Image: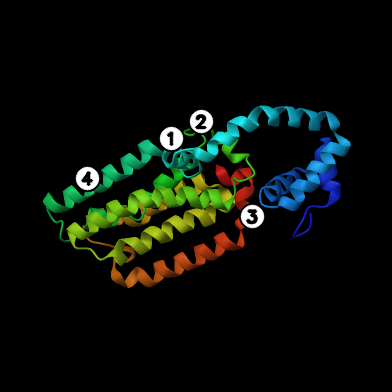
Amino acid sequence: MSVEHASMRIIDGYARGDMDIAADEVWALEAHLEVCRVCRDRLAAAVTAQAPAVASLVDTVWSDLEPQLAGTATMPRRRRWAARLPGWVTPAMVPWLAMVVSVTLLALLLDLVGPGSGEMSLVLLFSPVLPVLGVAASWSRGLDPAYELTASAPRAGLSLVLRRTASVLAVVVPALLMAGWVTGMTAAQWLLPCLALTSATLAFGGVVGVTRAAVALAGVWTAVVVAPTLAASRPTFALQSDGLPVWGLILALSIGVVIARRGAYSVLGAHR
């Protein structure tokens, strides 16, 4: 397939249902058809010429659906928003996001009333890894009953990964902002490590799968940062102001990897 349009060989084979077309070519064609009207018209002509039975079936189905689809033009704005919502979140994310917010509030409570809260902030300790847990839940095969359908769709690429990640951050970041404001922490202290670990999850997710990367980074954070901090009762270098340039570098490198490997998120392995 060329950069701008699909070749007629692939379109004709797709219209006939040929089994010898490579799976990656089929995937690329279906994703391309969503954004290219020219190739959709070429596919329609190919179906009419080479698969008249399919064309007849499509016409029959369309004639039944057209009156119903005409009614969607007057759909209330609230219902249209609800129809778009599954593209951003899944039901599996709700209890995990509620758990993440609950952990944030519990850490805030312990910071305010617990002994030694001025020396070591639990909000600061757990805030970088909380969005990572939400991202892991959004791509979990065991938690999402529609996982196979989502992972095999042509749109299941980087855009869907970013939408779900943005949904997690939209819930977690305001809760952390409130906790940081109450405890007197500057936003950079927790926001930069938070974004850096989240972007690193996506970067590694293109290689080993988003959920696996999230679980692995959460484990590394617990072993390298949480355990030493709790043992010493004082923040480690990773949580101090001197470590912010390192987090900025990790964030920039992770974003670069995600952009460079954006095609990897259309592979099923990236959703595990």
Residue type, mark 2 in image:
Pro
Give the number of the disc on residue 145. 2
Which quadrant: the C terminus?
Answer: top right
Q: Secondary structure at mark 4?
A: helix
Q: Which residue is mark 3?
A: 263
Image side of residue 176 versus residue 14, left or right: left
State whether residue 218 appears in this view. yes
Q: Earlier in the sequence, mark 3 or mark 2?
A: 2
Q: Which residue is mark 1?
A: 91
- Which image quarter: residue 271? top right
Q: Secondary structure at mark 3?
A: helix
Residue type, mark 1 in image:
Pro
> Residue 32: image x %, image y %?
70, 51
Residue type, mark 3 in image:
Gly
In the image shown, does 231 or 98 lie closer to the viewer?
A: 98
Query: Compared with residue 34, is residue 20 higher up or lower down, i.e. above or below?
Result: above
Q: Earlier in the sequence, mark 1 or mark 4?
A: 1
Task: Please report the residue visible at 83 percent of the width from the left and 28 percent of the height from the top.
Answer: 53
Give the number of the disc on residue 106. 4
Task: Using a 10 Å C-alpha cutoff, classify the residue at mark 3 as few (fewer than 14 neighbours), some (14 to 19) or many (20 or more).
Answer: few
